[in-house]
């Protein structure tokens, strides 16, 4: 079966289920000679770790990463980097009662149809948001590559439960658990979470992503456009339901004279294109917005059916977040980094061939 790997030169394959023994990733194509440690990767994993704040799953996972291969004496060797995170705090008992029931909003029904009933129902198995911990680990490797070229990716919450951030104070996002760039909006978001938690319901929101320092020329024509690969990577995250770049859906209401980004001898005068033209990076900041759906597991009673097509009602217990935000924020960052790292390496290979760089010779005539 396919569908578990992303990338062309920089490839990432994830494995594992929510209540299985472990979650992990294999990263292939990372160049040799980069300093990389478990501590470096761990800093990214700690951003999405559950059980830290109000409205998040109380599941206590330390998410400690172990590097199994691809690193020697603190440096990448150019061989596959295998990363593993063991599942520690697993409680599958709430799922035993509903193992034959299709939870509304979840992938239970579609997994049942696709895999002929051979699905891991515990915590959603492979379809669980728990899988994204492997993406964050792999994204940390990609981040290390991008750092060498001064490329920075940062994501933050601009809307949650209808509360919108008016300011973009990026210095504030790491000072609050929702990664919100507006202190007043952050306070209101927290109040909204408390309200909805009491109702037994959940919330959606919008994440904005900013990639700075991306050089012009990344992306391939037609099907491997940078914008297309970014959309695929981000929309592969289970909770994501919408993607836009630059002016996004607003372009439908603009004239060409309003939407086009004028250029002078100093560069672009605005960035409604969001950092790509023809699917290739323009050298401007890449700006993306992502719509995140409400968490599907809620205590409110919902109508559904079971595997026998019998109509039933369900109220989902267990340990669940009120919103995929904020834990989805580092996941989105990771997916953007993985795509940028892949296209960066592809463009570097292209430039190297154009310059006809010579292979190093150990034995000389």
Image (spheres, rainbow, N blue to C red):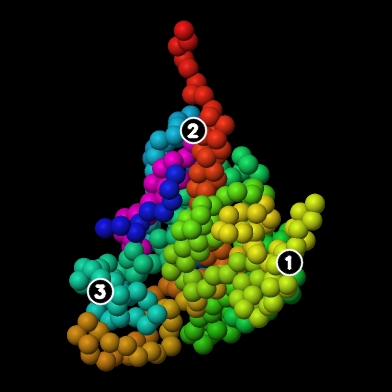
Residue 158 lies, in percent from the top left, at 65, 71
Q: Which residue is mark 1?
A: 168
Q: CB atoms at circles 3 and 2 under 8 Å apart?
A: no
**Marks 3/2: CA distance?**
42 Å
Q: Which residue is mark 3?
A: 112
Q: Which residues are magenta?
A: 10-35
Residue 302 in the image: above or below residue 165 = below
- Position of 115 with respect to 58 (left or right) is left
Could you classify mark 3 by the number of other residues whose Cα lies within 10 Å: few (under 14), some (14-19), or many (20 or more)?
some
Q: CB atoms at circles 1 and 2 under 8 Å apart?
A: no
Q: Which residue is mark 2?
A: 32
Rendered residue at 69%/55% (across/down) = 284
- Front-lying residue, 71 or 364: 364
Rendered residue at 62%/78% (across/down) = 252
**Marks 1/2: CA distance?**
37 Å
Q: Is residue 364 visible?
A: yes
Q: What count of labels does the image hold?
A: 3
Quick check: is 277 in the magenta stretch?
no
Q: Secondary structure at mark 1?
A: loop
Sequence-wise first label, 1 or 2? 2
Residue 149 lies, in percent from the top left, at 63, 41
Quick check: is 19 in the magenta stretch?
yes
Residue 198 in the image: above or below residue 233 = below
Could you classify mark 2 by the number of other residues whose Cα lies within 10 Å: few (under 14), some (14-19), or many (20 or more)?
few
Q: Secondary structure at mark 2?
A: loop
Residue 335 lies, in percent from the top left, at 51, 57
Single out the residue that lies furthest toward the front.
Answer: 256
Rendered residue at 61%/72% (across/down) = 248
Could you classify mark 1 by the number of other residues whose Cα lies within 10 Å: few (under 14), some (14-19), or many (20 or more)?
some
- Position of 111 with respect to 346 (left or right) is left
Q: Secondary structure at mark 3?
A: helix
Q: Which disc, if any, is residue 136? A: none
């Amino acid at each position: 079966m396919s569908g578990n790997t992303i990338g062309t030169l920089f490839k990432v394959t994830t494995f594992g289920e929510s209540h299985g023994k472990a979650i992990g990733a294999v990263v292939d194509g990372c160049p040799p000679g980069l300093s990389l440690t478990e501590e470096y990767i761990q800093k990214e994993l700690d951003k999405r770790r559950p059980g830290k704040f109000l409205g998040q799953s109380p599941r206590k996972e330390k998410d400690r990463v172990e590097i199994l291969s691809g690193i020697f004496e603190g440096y990448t060797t150019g061989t596959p980097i295998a990363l593993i995170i063991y599942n520690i705090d697993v409680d599958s008992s709430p799922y035993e009662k509903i193992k034959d029931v299709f939870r509304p909003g979840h992938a239970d029904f579609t997994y049942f149809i696709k895999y002929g009933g051979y699905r891991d129902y515990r915590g959603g198995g492979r379809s669980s948001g728990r899988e994204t911990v492997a993406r964050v680990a792999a994204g940390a490797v990609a981040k290390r590559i991008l750092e060498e070229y001064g490329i920075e990716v940062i994501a933050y919450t601009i809307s949650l439960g209808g509360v919108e951030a008016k300011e973009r104070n990026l210095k504030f996002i790491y000072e609050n658990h929702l990664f919100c760039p507006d202190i007043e909006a952050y306070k209101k978001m927290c109040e909204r979470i408390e309200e909805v938690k009491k109702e037994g319901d959940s919330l959606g929101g919008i994440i904005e992503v900013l990639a700075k320092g991306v050089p012009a020329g990344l992306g391939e024509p037609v099907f491997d456009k940078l914008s297309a690969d970014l959309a695929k990577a981000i929309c592969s995250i289970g909770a994501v339901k919408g993607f836009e770049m630059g002016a996004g859906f607003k372009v439908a209401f603009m004239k060409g004279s309003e939407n086009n980004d004028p250029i002078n001898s100093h560069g672009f005068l605005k960035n409604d294109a969001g950092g790509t033209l023809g699917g290739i990076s323009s050298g401007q900041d890449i700006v993306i917005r992502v719509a995140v759906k409400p968490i599907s597991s809620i205590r409110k009673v919902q109508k559904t059916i079971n595997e026998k097509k019998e109509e039933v009602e369900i109220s989902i217990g267990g340990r669940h977040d009120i919103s995929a935000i904020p834990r989805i924020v580092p996941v989105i960052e990771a997916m953007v980094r993985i795509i940028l790292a892949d296209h960066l390496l592809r463009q570097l290979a292209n430039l190297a061939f154009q310059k006809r760089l010579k292979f190093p010779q150990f034995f000389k005539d």
